[in-house]
Each structure stands twice: as structure tokens, then as C-alpha cells.
């Protein structure tokens, strides 16, 4: 055959093959399309349903909620294998890819953009409502919080930002827009006064708006929890009458007194913890020195015997020996002269002259390691031990971990007895030095621990496991003694509840939540609004979660993490900071415009509290013009001058009112709140106050939610009962909490923020020279504090060495010459000559 003919024949054959392949592919594609079509038809129909739902939501101005999305997602058809395979085809698979992408990825984005449009439309459509539902128009922030009607919404509200207005308007909006009827709306508050105020505001404002509030109720968590149990069981429980007004702490104290009387073991453990363990730091190097020995010029810790020792561990040993009547000498020179070119004369920690025995207490943790910054410590230990080996002197050894983390004092006591020393334990032995922790303070700590254990439904086994797994910051033996004491007190507490046929707050809330979770009762509320959410305990969170567990119910939680100050009562800030883990996903909104304080107070207080990074960020702005310097310090020389300083502040304010410099406030008078960290600070308020002023004393805790034109804080100082308080932060509390806050004085810092933000115009702090609060020093360093002309002592500069204290005038004992020293002495020993 001719070559040309062959070529033509080959080309034709090849073309036929290509055509055949194309036909086969087309047939396969057609078959794939046919196979995929039923699935694509379902996906089209589902998307059309979603798009129709979105269009209806836009037309009606109804938020597309999380539960609506979940319903759509639950009904969406799964694409068939043919539909999935079709997406791999470039052109023919375009629609399949589009449909499946919408199902898997685009729905949330589409709903998000739709809700943004709905919110924008609602803010415009309902503007008249938002402008009139309260006495003043809602801000855009407030109106957005009202109209963002998702199933779970958290509103983080700055101090004075009008959170109550949001709750009132939210209830009114739900009724007006026919989202939820009035009788299916519940407002929950944390105390009776707050619940009564919510009810009054709702009734008043809804009535003024022409909205019928019938059936809409505000309640405390406690009252509501009792109703839940009553409805679930047919028998409403009775709260114990000794729970309110601090009577619960008094009951713990009575229980402790009775247990100490009838149980020698309990008495010993309680006294040991209170006297020896309660003041302990949580690591071998921890704690700030509190004493100075002017003879030896040693900085350290004061013992019950009046000595100054170098560490808290040594103080613990010395106090144990003192309470047992053991004769000892602290840092007596070693019997042999061993000083050399590298070592000064050896002085062991303790010496027992009656039996000629020396005692070293090593700063070693549970891993046998000294603190990281104790350079050369291990070598020093080895040298000291070698001396006793060389000279054959008797040595007792203890470590920080052996006592506080492992075995307590039993091994030391046994060793002392074995060497012929008699121990005569007497917790009532007259003390000549340091002041021990008070019975009532330890009782208060026990009650706080109880609130968290009960609220978190922790069992003995739970606490046991937490103890076994406790980090180094919670010494195990110390914690185990505390927990043993706690369970004994807890059992007696429960016995008294049973005897009175009563229940306490925590058990009641947990029981109410359990009934709701089990479906024993449905209280029938579709919209739940929770106030002061930063103070929620885990029991309260469980109850709120159970109330809205059914689909298409709504929860709005309003709070300010910067104002979380009730940990002692069981509050758990992690409920707020982990909102989505507790309640499911939903938007978090912010109210950052305040109607109370001027911008300068907002900036000072906000910068101060926001140094703790484990909190929500806020940018608080004020609607008010500046009044003047936001915070001033009245500085006096002695503690007894504080009441007269408060009186000078009040007299000065009254004179300025009479002169017209200060105008009356919102109530027609000038309101002054004297806020004390403790109830006994009331003693600083004069009995007679100027008639131009309305003066009230409150504790900072009780001032929450309130405000005044001027705020005065007396006794802002350092020490056990200072501000910050050194009483409240025992590391053992972390055992009962879900998440401890490691930031120093975290809750005290928030409490100070609450105090500052009660003021509409100005805050005055009163402090004593040489007893400066760490918070005052911090404000001075940040240049956020001015010295008041009412001071009797000049303002000092921050200490250039430690930065935490200020320089104060002192006198030398030897010649009475003045010098400048740090107010944190003896913790900081910086000195310099006066300028």
C-alpha cells in the first residue's frame, strides 16, 4: 500500500479512536451527572430553604440564631459519592462544587453577613423604641446588645455603662417584637435589692412604653432555686437562718469551737494550721520579710519568741519549738572555729543546749532542689554537713518540703524526743513576737473553700485526686491538713442543716440545677437574662445553662470581669471567661461607654486593672467632661490621724459647695461615699458630717453597682488588713476552683478598681507615711496620683531599688540623724541621705 494511503488510513483510525474515547467519556460523565442529580436536587432544595429562611429573616428583622443554623445543618442532605466525584470535573462539576461548598463552608459566613444586615436595619427601624424605652436614648452599643438576639449572648459591660438598661430594653424588645411573651421571660440577679430594682425598672419602663409586663419576673438565684426544687419535688426547702449577713462565718467559728472542745485531734490540727501553716508562703524562697533586728541588722521574719530569722521555713521551725516549750538558740556560732578564706564562722540554724544537738533547716523543694536563684546553696550544704561529720557533732536535718509538703512536724518531733527533748505543746503559750492568724480569719477561709467545693460539686475523692496532683505551688501536707479540717467542719455543718431541716445556698443551687438537668421540671422560660455575671459560681452557671438547654431558648449574660470581687462567696470568673465552653457559641459584645466617671478616672482605673492579662480588654470612654485631677492622696504621719484626715476632706468639700465651686449632683445634693476595705473602717467617719453633704459609709464590696459624686477611701495601706489585703489569698483555695488566677492580688486589684469607679467626679485616698499600699505606690509610679494639700506629710518618690515602695524619712537609732528609707522596709533596705 502506498505510504500516503497508509497515512490517511492511520489518521482516520486515530480520529475514530479519539471520537470513541470522547463518546465514552461523555457517556460516563452523563451517567455520573444522572447519578449525582438526585443528591444535587436535594442540595438545591436545602439551599433554597435556607435562602428563603434568610430572606424571611431579613424581611421580618429576625435574628438568624445559632439554633436555627443548627436546625438547618441537621437537615442538610449528605452529598452522594457521585456528587462528590462530580466536583472533580472542571466544568460539569461547577454547580456541585458550589452546592457542597455552601453546605460545608459558606453557611456561617452567609448567616453572619445576613445578621449584620438585620442588625443595621433593626437599629434604624426601631430607633424610636431604642430612644424612648429608657429615660435616655440607648447608645449604639446598648441598642446592638438588645437587638443581637442570638441564643447565647454575653455582654461585657464596663462600670457605669448602663447594663441594667440593656436588660430592661431586651425584655421589652422581646415582647414588642413577639419573640418571647412576657410570662416566659426571667431576669436573675444576685441579691434581693438588685432583683427588686430590676423588677421596678421593668415594670416602670415597659408600662411607660405601652408594653404589658404582666408575668415578667425578676428573682434572685436563691429564691428561684428554691422554687425549682419545690416544683420538682412538691416540697419547697427552707434556707438555714444562719446564712446571711456574715452569720455563716460565725457558724463555722462556733462549729470550730465545739470541735476543738470535744476532739483533741481536731484541736491540734486546727491550732497547728492556724499558728504554723496559715502564714506560710508557697515555696522555699517565698514571702516578703516583715521584721528587722536592729542589733544584728538582719532582715527577716519575726517569730513568736520575738527573734528575727532569715526565712519563713526557719520561722515555722522556731514557732513550733516555742509552742512546744523547747529551749533553743538561733544561729549560735558552731562549737569549732571553722572560718577560712572562703567561709565565715559557721552558724547552724538552731542549737539545742539541753542535749548538745545542732539543727539545719534546708530550703529544698519536693524535688530536693533549692530555689534557682540560691547560688552556691548546694555547695554550702555539703560544706556544713562535712563539718558535722569531721567533728562528730550531732545534727538534725529538715527541709521546707519535708515539713510543709510531705510529713509535717512528726519526724522532727520524733527526732527531738529520741534525743531526750521533752515537747509540751501549748497553743495558748503567751506570744512575745509575731501575731498569728486569727481564728475568725481561718474560719472565713474555710467558709470560702466550702462555697467553692459545694458549688463545684466536689467530693472527697475529687479533692483527694486534686491533692495528689497538686502543683508545687500547693504544698501537699499543708493542704492535706487543711482539707482534713474542712471535711470535719463540713460534716458538722451538714449535720446542723439536717437538724434544722434546712439547706444552704450552694447545695440548693446545685440541687435545683440537677432537677432541671434531669428534666424533673421545666420552669417554662424561653428568655433568661442574668445580671452581674462575673459573680456567677459554677452552681449558678449550671442552673442558667439548664434553664435554656432546650432548643430555641435565649440566654443573655451581662457582667464585667474587671468587677469580679466575690470569690470568697464562690464566684468563679472562669464561667465568664470560658462562656462558650459553658453555654455554647454565641456573640460577645461590649458596653464601653460609661455614664458615670470622667475620662480621667476611666483611664486611671482601667490602666490599673488591665495589667492582669487574664481578663477581657476594654477601651472605656466617658460621656462626661473632665472635673479635675481624678485621684488624690491625703498623706498623714500616723494611723490615728486617718479620722481627722477624713474629716478635713469632708469639711473642704462642704466649703467648696458653699462657695459654689462644687454644684449639687444628680440627687440635688453632693453625695460622698466613704468606702472601707473592711467594716471597721467605719470608725474613720466622723459622727457629725457637714449638712451640705450626704455622707454614707459602705464597704467596697457593698458599694458595687452604686455611685457617688465623691469617693473617699480611708486606710489605704499595707499589712494584713491593708488594701490590698494579705488575708484573702491562701493558695489552698485553688484546690476547689476550676482555674486560679496567678496574677498578684488579682481580686484585690479588681476590688480597688470597683472603689475607684464608684466616683462621678473625684476619688481621695488616705494613706499613712511608711505604710504605703502597693496600689498607691503603683499609681505614683504611673503618675496617676496627686498629693492633696490636705496632707500633713509630703509626697515621696518611688523607691529606686525595689520600685514597689516609696522613700520615707527615718531616724538612725544611734544618733537620731534623718535619712530616707524604703517604706517596704525590712523587705527592701534601700537608704540614702536626704537631699
Image: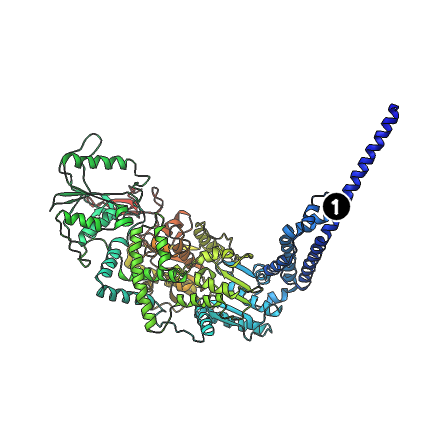
Which residue is pictured at 18% across the width and 33% down the height? 339
Q: Residue 164: x, y in percent? A: 51, 65
Classify residue 68 as left or right of residue 7: left
Q: Mark 1 points at which residue?
A: 92
Quick check: 433 above or below 556? above
Asked whether 138 or 355 is in front, the reply is 355
Question: Can you name the residue that lies furthest to the left here?
Answer: 354
Q: Residue 654: x, y in percent? A: 40, 64
Quick check: 620 above or below 386? below
From where the camera sits, is residue 764 visible? yes
Quick check: 507 above or below 630? below
Q: Residue 373: x, y in percent? A: 32, 39
Q: Is mark 1 on a helix, strand or loop?
A: loop
Asked whether 296 or 574 is in front, the reply is 574
From where the camera sits, is residue 135 visible? no
Question: Can you name the residue that lies furthest to the front here?
Answer: 1
Give the quarter of the image for residue 222: bottom left
- How many circles with numbers are drawn on the protein? 1
Image quadrant in which the N terminus is located: top right
Classify residue 778 as left or right of residue 206: left
Which residue is pictured at 67% across the width and 61% down the height? 53
Give the quarter of the image for residue 60: bottom right
Q: Coloured how?
A: rainbow
Question: Can you name the residue that lies furthest to the top here?
Answer: 2
Image quadrant in which the C terminus is located: top left
Question: Badge 1: how crowded within 10 Å, few (<14), some, or many (20+)?
Answer: some
Give the quarter of the image for residue 800: top left
Amino acid at each position: 500500500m502506498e505510504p500516503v494511503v497508509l497515512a490517511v488510513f492511520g489518521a482516520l483510525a486515530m480520529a475514530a479512536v479519539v471520537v470513541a474515547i470522547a463518546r465514552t467519556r461523555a457517556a460516563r460523565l452523563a451517567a455520573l451527572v444522572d447519578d449525582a442529580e438526585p443528591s444535587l436536587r436535594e442540595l438545591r432544595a436545602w439551599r433554597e430553604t435556607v435562602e428563603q429562611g434568610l430572606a424571611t429573616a431579613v424581611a421580618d428583622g429576625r435574628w438568624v440564631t445559632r439554633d436555627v443554623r443548627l436546625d438547618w445543618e441537621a437537615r442538610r442532605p449528605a452529598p452522594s459519592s457521585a456528587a462528590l466525584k462530580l466536583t472533580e470535573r472542571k466544568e460539569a462539576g461547577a454547580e456541585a462544587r458550589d452546592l457542597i461548598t455552601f453546605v460545608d463552608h459558606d453557611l456561617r459566613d452567609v448567616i453572619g453577613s445576613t445578621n449584620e444586615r438585620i442588625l443595621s436595619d433593626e437599629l434604624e427601624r426601631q430607633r424610636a423604641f431604642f430612644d424612648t424605652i429608657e429615660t435616655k436614648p440607648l447608645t449604639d452599643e446598648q441598642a446592638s446588645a438588645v437587638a443581637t438576639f442570638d441564643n447565647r449572648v454575653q455582654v461585657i459591660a464596663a462600670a457605669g455603662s448602663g447594663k441594667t438598661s440593656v436588660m430592661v430594653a431586651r425584655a421589652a424588645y422581646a415582647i414588642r417584637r413577639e419573640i418571647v411573651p412576657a410570662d416566659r421571660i426571667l431576669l436573675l440577679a444576685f441579691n434581693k435589692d438588685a432583683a427588686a430594682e430590676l423588677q421596678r425598672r421593668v415594670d416602670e419602663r415597659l408600662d411607660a412604653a405601652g408594653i404589658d409586663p404582666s408575668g415578667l419576673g425578676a428573682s434572685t438565684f436563691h429564691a428561684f432555686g428554691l422554687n425549682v426544687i419545690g416544683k420538682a419535688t412538691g416540697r419547697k426547702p427552707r434556707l438555714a437562718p444562719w446564712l446571711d449577713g456574715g452569720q455563716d462565718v460565725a457558724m463555722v467559728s462556733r462549729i470550730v469551737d465545739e470541735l476543738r472542745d470535744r476532739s483533741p485531734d481536731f484541736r491540734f490540727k486546727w491550732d497547728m494550721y492556724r499558728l504554723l501553716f496559715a502564714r506560710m508562703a508557697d515555696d522555699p524562697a517565698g514571702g516578703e520579710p516583715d521584721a528587722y533586728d536592729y542589733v544584728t541588722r538582719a532582715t527577716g521574719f519575726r517569730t513568736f519568741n520575738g527573734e528575727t530569722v532569715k526565712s519563713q521555713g526557719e520561722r515555722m521551725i522556731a514557732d513550733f519549738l516555742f509552742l512546744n516549750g523547747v529551749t533553743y538558740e538561733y544561729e549560735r556560732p558552731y562549737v569549732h572555729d571553722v572560718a577560712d578564706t572562703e567561709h565565715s564562722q559557721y552558724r547552724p540554724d538552731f542549737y539545742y543546749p539541753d542535749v548538745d544537738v545542732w539543727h539545719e533547716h534546708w530550703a529544698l523543694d519536693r524535688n530536693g532542689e533549692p530555689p534557682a536563684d540560691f547560688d552556691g546553696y548546694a555547695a554550702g550544704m555539703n560544706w556544713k554537713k562535712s563539718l558535722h561529720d569531721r567533728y562528730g557533732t550531732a545534727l538534725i536535718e529538715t527541709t521546707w518540703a519535708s515539713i510543709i509538703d510531705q510529713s509535717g512536724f512528726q519526724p522532727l518531733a520524733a527526732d527531738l524526743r529520741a534525743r531526750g527533748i521533752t515537747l509540751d505543746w501549748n497553743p495558748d503559750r503567751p506570744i512575745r513576737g509575731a501575731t498569728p492568724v486569727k481564728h475568725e480569719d481561718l474560719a472565713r477561709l474555710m467558709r470560702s473553700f466550702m462555697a467553692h467545693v459545694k458549688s463545684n460539686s466536689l467530693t472527697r475523692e475529687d479533692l483527694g485526686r486534686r491533692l495528689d496532683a497538686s502543683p508545687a505551688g500547693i504544698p501537699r501536707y499543708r493542704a492535706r491538713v487543711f482539707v482534713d479540717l474542712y471535711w470535719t467542719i463540713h460534716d458538722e455543718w451538714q449535720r446542723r442543716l439536717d437538724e434544722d431541716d434546712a439547706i444552704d445556698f450552694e447545695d440548693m443551687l446545685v440541687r435545683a440545677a440537677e432537677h432541671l438537668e434531669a428534666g424533673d421540671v421545666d420552669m417554662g422560660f424561653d428568655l433568661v437574662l442574668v445580671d452581674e455575671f462575673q459573680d456567677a459560681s459554677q452552681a449558678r452557671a449550671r442552673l442558667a445553662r439548664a434553664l435554656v438547654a432546650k432548643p430555641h431558648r435565649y440566654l443573655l449574660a451581662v457582667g464585667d470581669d474587671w468587677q469580679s470581687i466575690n470569690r470568697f462567696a464562690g464566684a468563679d470568673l472562669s464561667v465568664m471567661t470560658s462562656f462558650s465552653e459553658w453555654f455554647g457559641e454565641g456573640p460577645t459584645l461590649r458596653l464601653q461607654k460609661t455614664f458615670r466617671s470622667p475620662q480621667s478616672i476611666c483611664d486611671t482605673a482601667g490602666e490599673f486593672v488591665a495589667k492582669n492579662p487574664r481578663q477581657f480588654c476594654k477601651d472605656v470612654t466617658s460621656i462626661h467632661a473632665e472635673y479635675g485631677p481624678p485621684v488624690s492622696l491625703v498623706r498623714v504621719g500616723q494611723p490615728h490621724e486617718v479620722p481627722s484626715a477624713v474629716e478635713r476632706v469632708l469639711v473642704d468639700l462642704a466649703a467648696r459647695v458653699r462657695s459654689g465651686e462644687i454644684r449639687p449632683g444628680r440627687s440635688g445634693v453632693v453625695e460622698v461615699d466613704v468606702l472601707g476595705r473592711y467594716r471597721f473602717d467605719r470608725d474613720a467617719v466622723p459622727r457629725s458630717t457637714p449638712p451640705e453633704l450626704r455622707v454614707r459609709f459602705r464597704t467596697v464590696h457593698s458599694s458595687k453597682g452604686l455611685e457617688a459624686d465623691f469617693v473617699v477611701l480611708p486606710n489605704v495601706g499595707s499589712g494584713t488588713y491593708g488594701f490590698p489585703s494579705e488575708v484573702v489569698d491562701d493558695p489552698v483555695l485553688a484546690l476547689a476552683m476550676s482555674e486560679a488566677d496567678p496574677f498578684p492580688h488579682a481580686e484585690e486589684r479588681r476590688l480597688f478598681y470597683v472603689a475607684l469607679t464608684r466616683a462621678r467626679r473625684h476619688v481621695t485616698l488616705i494613706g499613712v507615711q511608711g505604710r504605703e499600699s502597693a496600689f498607691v505606690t503603683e499609681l505614683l509610679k504611673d503618675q496617676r496620683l496627686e498629693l492633696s494639700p490636705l496632707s500633713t506629710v509630703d509626697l515621696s518618690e518611688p523607691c529606686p531599688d525595689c520600685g514597689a515602695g516609696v522613700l520615707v524619712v527615718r531616724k538612725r537609732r544611734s544618733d537620731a540623724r534623718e535619712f530616707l528609707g524604703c517604706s517596704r522596709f525590712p523587705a527592701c533596705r534601700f537608704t540614702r541621705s536626704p537631699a
